[in-house]
Amino acid sequence: MFGQAPVIAGFLRLLCYAARRSRDPHAAADLTADVFLAAIAVAKGYREGLGSPITWLYGIARNVVAAEKRRAAREWAAESQVAGHRFLDDDDIARLEDRIDIERDSVALLASIDTLPAVSRPPSNSSPWTV
């Protein structure tokens, strides 16, 4: 389908294209590789009458770069949601479990108080501060 010289020339041109759209040389190389992987995957769909191979590769590159920018935006949004939040450590989890157990026990205690005869029940408005 394509000769070796156009592929090498196309690679260099696409590497420059990716480098202009990326801040990282490694990312530019990855994007260029992704372009060629995508081109290999859809090579049967290439129609010479619609443009040159390099034009076709630029179209694929544009889509690959756009997809990467969308992915990076989703990643940034996800990271922004958790930024500034402190994650729970083992001590935090232990304290929360203790609190849950205390709440569960207090519900059981209140239920057992309700089963006492009215004479034995403490007044509902009693407080250690009232006389």
Image (cartoon, helix red, strand yellow):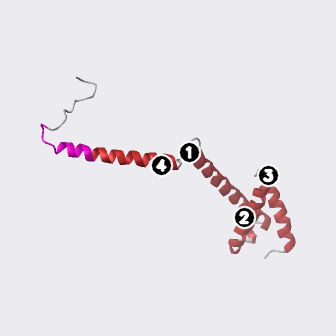
- The question of residue 113 being in magenta is answered with yes
Q: Which residues are magenta?
A: 108-119
User: Relative to 63, is 41 above or below?
Assistant: below
Query: Closer to the N terminus: mark 1 or mark 3?
Result: 3
In the drawing, does residue 78 fall left or right of residue 52? left
> Which residue position is annotated with label 1?
81
- Residue 71 percent across, percent down from the top left: 63, 55
Which of discs 4 and 3 lies nearer the camera? The answer is: 4
Q: Residue furthest right?
A: 5
Q: Amino acid at mark 3?
A: Arg
> Which residue position is annotated with label 3?
20
- Residue 45 percent across, percent down from the top left: 68, 72
Q: Amino acid at mark 2?
A: Asp
Is residue 34 visible from the viewing direction of this image?
A: yes
Q: Amino acid at mark 1?
A: Gln
Residues at marks 2 and 3 touching, judged by CB atoms closer than 8 Å: no
User: Relative to 33, is 96 above or below?
Assistant: above
Q: Residue furthest bottom?
A: 1
Within 10 Å of the Cα at label 1, are there few (<14), some (14-19), or many (20+) other Cα atoms? few
Query: Closer to the N terminus: mark 4 or mark 2?
Result: 2
Which of discs 4 and 2 lies nearer the camera? The answer is: 4
**How many labels sit on residues?**
4
> Which residue position is annotated with label 2?
34
Within 10 Å of the Cα at label 4, are there few (<14), some (14-19), or many (20+) other Cα atoms? few
Query: Closer to the N terminus: mark 4 or mark 1?
Result: 1
What distance separates the C-alpha of mark 1 from that of mark 2?
Answer: 29 Å
What distance separates the C-alpha of mark 1 from that of mark 3?
Answer: 30 Å
Residue at horizontal 59%, vertical 47%? Answer: 77
